[in-house]
């Protein structure tokens, strides 16, 4: 499915939204108090206004010739990029407001570069530009993990960087191979009926950022180790940018339906078992992105609308949940359910915002998830994909169970597992964190209650979908009621347990340890043996040869040259003894005679 821009090529009036963030980040260290917080707000707001301008004037911008062979397109603004650009730049404002209390400029700089990379990918028209911003996004987000000083953050950052570098290499190989075959670098929809090796390489590179199994383990690992503010940014941008690229290039690929459903089920199962707040939310992201990947795979106009709508809604309610989780960690310093509980009196506002996020992701009527998730499920039934539709409906039960019930219950109600110190420290967060959460909560309600706000930005506006039908409302309320009753009976089984759930990353780590053993033992032995053989055979023979040639040079060549010189010197002394006896008349005679001989010889010859 290709989305053609309305107008073509306007370069002079184009200011890329990513540039505003990049220059804003570069200048940030020069801004001092009391203007710093104002500056932190102004830069993402300017970016958002720039995105609004582009959305009102779709077209192709920023077309630049490159090395006489290629054309780079930095600003493709069409129906698909409009909605993603809007929500990404809006989330940049919310995330920055949430982190206003952070005095470390480097965290803001990394976050803005990260958002700039995401916006660059969304507006890219070719693979070279996409790859440039794709890597900016990966490297900038790594620092959002490394800036966290908690134990394990450094290692998690390295794992995150290695995984995303691997994904970048797959993407690079894919589009280079495609260029060799087609001579085309444009980032457009690929044909499922004509798949080549490059097709699967590009898809794998993009799917890695979407955390599609088995390339998903980096997500809960990294997001749980990022800084409080960094996790809010990370939960919004990486996976949804990848969903955008999949919708752009691989809409209608059947394999994505299977992978999406597997994601949705796999993620929600692990979320039920998790003991860490942000890991639970990370697994829940895997599950919700599964809906989007399945929607891309279905590929109909309604499914693509549902994918875009769910990405839009997901950024808001997942950002809200991560902000509430961050408020708890910021206040108590704890992130394990086994170290929390009974905090509803100490943090009532945080409880309120977490519940809003929970019921939004659980698709409560009048909240954002209700209008977006049901689009994808309806699209699957319309396409006669009954198994996929049924399984995605079942997953929504698990979503409410995990995010709507288990999460707030274990933190704010249930057994109080807090230490005295934790309980005393627990309190609602600073005003800026309140403001950011209030903005996200309001938008969750707005998206679910005022449909034109979201529907007018969807790429296929000609497709009508009415979520507030009696059947859908009745079905949703029955599912929610059944899940709530089931939780009452199962809450002890779903309680906090200090366990570690093994995932596919266990195999990666096992393989990593195996590779380390190979490197430290057989490979190191071979390297040592080779070094020894080189010293004995290569280096020794080289030294012997060098010594021989040195001897030959000294005694052979230098002897010949020096002997010749001595002979010439001796001959010269003999001639000098004969010709230079001190009598000037005799010398003049010999000279004139020699000159006459030369003159006569010259005349005769």
Image (cartoon, helix red, strand yellow):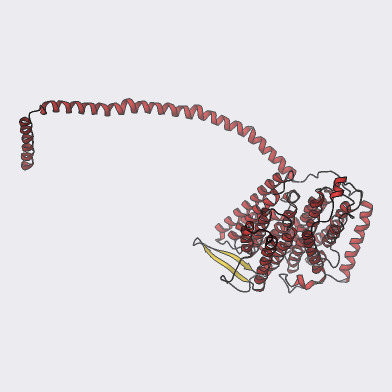
- Would you say 501 lies left or right of 162 here? right
Q: Quadrant of residue 247?
A: bottom right
Q: Quarter of the image for the N terminus: give it.
A: bottom right
Residue pictured at 50% horizontal, 26% vertical: 536
Q: Quarter of the image for the C terminus: give it.
A: top left
Q: Nearer the viewer, residue 313 or 154?
A: 154
Residue pictured at 34% horizontal, 27% vertical: 552
Can residue 255 be seen here? The reply is no
- Would you say 111 lies left or right of 579 here? right
The vertical placement of 79 against 408, above or below, is below
The x, y position of residue 161, in whole percent, is: 66, 49
Q: Nearer the viewer, residue 47 or 391?
A: 47
Q: Nearer the viewer, residue 293 or 564?
A: 564
The x, y position of residue 344, in whole percent, is: 89, 55
Q: Residue furthest front?
A: 34
Can residue 61 be seen here? The reply is yes
Q: Quadrant of residue 305?
A: bottom right
Residue pictured at 37% horizontal, 28% vertical: 550
The x, y position of residue 113, in whole percent, is: 65, 57
The x, y position of residue 428, in whole percent, is: 83, 56
- Would you say 586 lies left or right of 101 here? left
The vertical placement of 202 against 9, above or below, is above
> So how many labels did they put on this image?
0
The vertical placement of 115 against 225, above or below, is below
């Amino acid at each position: 499915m290709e989305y053609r821009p309305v107008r073509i090529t306007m370069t002079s009036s184009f200011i890329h939204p990513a540039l505003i963030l990049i220059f804003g980040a570069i200048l940030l260290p020069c801004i001092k108090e009391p203007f710093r917080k104002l500056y932190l707000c102004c830069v993402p707001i300017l970016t958002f206004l720039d995105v609004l301008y582009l959305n009102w004037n779709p077209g192709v911008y920023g077309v630049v010739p490159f090395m006489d062979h290629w054309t780079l397109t930095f600003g493709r603004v069409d129906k698909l990029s409009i909605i993603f650009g809007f929500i990404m730049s809006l989330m940049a404002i919310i995330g920055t407001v949430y982190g206003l209390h952070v005095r470390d400029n480097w965290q803001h700089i990394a976050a803005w570069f990260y958002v700039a990379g995401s916006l660059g990918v969304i507006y890219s028209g070719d693979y070279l530009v996409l790859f440039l911003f794709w890597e900016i996004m990966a490297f900038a987000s790594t620092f959002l993990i490394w800036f966290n000083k908690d134990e394990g953050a450094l290692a998690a950052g390295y794992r995150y960087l290695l995984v995303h570098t691997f994904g970048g290499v797959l993407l690079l190989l894919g589009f280079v191979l495609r260029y060799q075959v087609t001579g085309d670098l444009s980032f457009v929809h690929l044909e499922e009926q004509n798949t080549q090796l490059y097709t699967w390489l590009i898809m794998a590179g993009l799917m890695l950022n979407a955390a599609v199994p088995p390339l998903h383990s980096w997500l809960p690992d990294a997001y749980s180790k990022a800084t409080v503010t960094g996790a809010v940014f990370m939960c919004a941008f990486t996976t949804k940018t990848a969903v955008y690229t999949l919708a752009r290039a691989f809409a209608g690929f059947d394999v994505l339906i299977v992978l999406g459903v597997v994601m949705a089920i796999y993620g929600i199962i692990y979320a039920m078992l998790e003991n860490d707040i942000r890991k639970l939310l990370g697994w829940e992201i895997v599950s919700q992105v599964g809906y989007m990947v399945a929607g891309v795979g279905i590929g109909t106009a309604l499914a693509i609308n549902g994918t875009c709508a769910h990405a839009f809604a997901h950024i808001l309610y997942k950002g809200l949940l991560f902000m509430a989780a961050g408020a708890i960690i910021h206040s108590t310093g704890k992130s394990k359910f086994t170290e929390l509980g009974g905090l509803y009196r100490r943090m009532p506002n945080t409880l309120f915002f977490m519940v809003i996020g929970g019921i939004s992701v659980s698709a409560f009527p009048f909240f954002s998830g209700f209008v977006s998730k049901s689009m994808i499920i309806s699209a699957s039934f319309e396409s006669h994909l009954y198994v996929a539709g049924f399984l995605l409906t079942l997953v929504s039960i698990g979503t409410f169970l995990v995010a709507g019930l288990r999460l707030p219950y274990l933190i704010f109600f249930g057994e109080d597992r807090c230490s005295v110190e934790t309980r005393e420290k627990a309190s609602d967060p600073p005003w800026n964190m309140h403001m950011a959460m209030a903005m996200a909560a309001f938008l969750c309600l707005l998206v679910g209650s005022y449909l034109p706000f979201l529907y007018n930005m969807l790429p296929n506006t000609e497709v009508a979908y009415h979520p507030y039908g009696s059947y859908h409302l009745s079905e949703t309320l029955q599912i929610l009621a059944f899940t709530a009753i089931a939780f009452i009976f199962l809450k002890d089984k779903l309680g906090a347990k200090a366990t570690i759930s093994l995932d596919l990353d266990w195999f990666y780590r096992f393989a990593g340890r195996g590779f380390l053993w190979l490197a430290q033992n057989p490979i190191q032995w071979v390297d040592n043996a080779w070094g020894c053989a080189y010293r004995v055979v290569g280096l020794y023979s080289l030294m012997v040869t060098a010594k021989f040639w040195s001897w030959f040079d000294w005694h052979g060549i230098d002897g010949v040259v020096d002997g010749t010189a001595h002979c010439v010197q001796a001959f010269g002394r003999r001639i000098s003894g004969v010709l230079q006896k001190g009598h000037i008349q005799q010398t003049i005679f010999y000279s004139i005679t020699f000159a006459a001989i030369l003159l006569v010889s010259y005349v005769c010859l």
